[in-house]
Image (tube, rainbow, N blue to C red):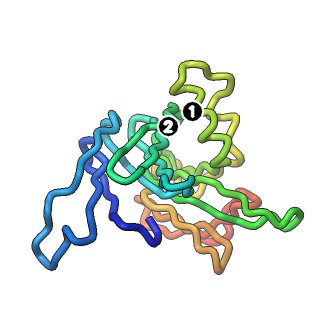
Amino acid sequence: VDNADRYLSYSRRGDLLVWKPDAIEGAKVSNPREFATNLPFITGMDHVKRIGRADRMCLSSADKQVSFVDLIRDTCKITGHVKVDFSPLCMCTVAQMDESTGEIDLMITFGDDGGNVHLYDMEKLNCIAEEHLKGAPSSLPKDACLKTWAAHGRHSWVTKVAWVDDMRVLVSGGSDGQLVLSDVTKGEVRLD
């Protein structure tokens, strides 16, 4: 979390770990505060926005789950939870200016186990996840999907995605050993 008073990580068993900066001194690391997320195998985590004093995080899991979590001081509250139709192996936030309105569009990008990259509207996915957590879903996660494209071979796992704002490209790495540059506006590979 940018300019924060804590560091965040996750364990493969599904815990969100919150570290205080003074807990990390050279080789000596104090125990972090653990919060159970009920996600069996966390594959990605990203800071999606700041809401008042809370930091909204998005977590993905290999079993097709995406959760939104608010961190406020020493508490962790799940605010939304939804199941998608692919296994998200990695994720990142994309902040891109809409040239027609001048507003910043926040999107979440996921890489999957079939070589695809999925681009979602962050606000829509967050709202859908909140509805699903409350047990009153009026929309499906696919309603928040903006684009999906094949960035790597269909038998490749997309293991890392990162937004490069200066170049306005999404970089993805996969088990096929390639780095791919994609245009998120068009939803297509620019260079591989």
Q: Mark 2 or mark 1, which is nearer the start of the sequence?
A: 2
Does 16 sit left or right of 57 as displayed?
left
Q: Is residue 85 above or below residue 182?
A: above
Q: Amino acid at mark 2?
A: Thr
Of the numbered discs in the image, which one, if any, rests on residue 59? none
Pointer 1 local density, CA inside 10 Å: few below 14, some 14–19, many at least 20: many
Query: Within the image, what quadrant is residue 31 found in?
Result: bottom left
Q: Residue furthest left?
A: 28
Residue for badge 2: 79
- CA gap, disc 1 and disc 2: 6 Å
Q: Is residue 134 above or below residue 127?
A: above
Q: Which residue sits at x=28%, y=53%?
A: 17
Q: Position of residue 67 (x, y in %)?
A: 47, 39
- The quadrant of the picture occupied by the N terminus is bottom left
Q: Position of residue 94 (x, y in %)?
A: 61, 62
Does 145 sit left or right of 152 as displayed?
right
SS for callout 1 = helix
Q: Position of residue 87 (x, y in %)?
A: 46, 40
Q: Which residue sits at x=36%, y=67%?
A: 5
Q: Amino acid at mark 1?
A: Glu
Q: Position of residue 126 (x, y in %)?
A: 59, 41
Q: Which residue sits at x=63%, y=48%?
A: 122
Does 7 sit left or right of 45 as displayed?
left
Pointer 2 local density, CA inside 10 Å: few below 14, some 14–19, many at least 20: many
Q: Is residue 161 above or below residue 24?
A: above
Of the numbered discs in the image, which one, if any, rests on residue 130? 1
- The quadrant of the picture occupied by the C terminus is bottom right
SS for callout 2 = strand
The one nearer the camera, 61 or 101, is 101
The one nearer the camera, 7 or 109, is 7
The one nearer the camera, 158 or 57, is 57
Q: Are marks 1 and 2 in contact (CB under 8 Å)?
A: yes
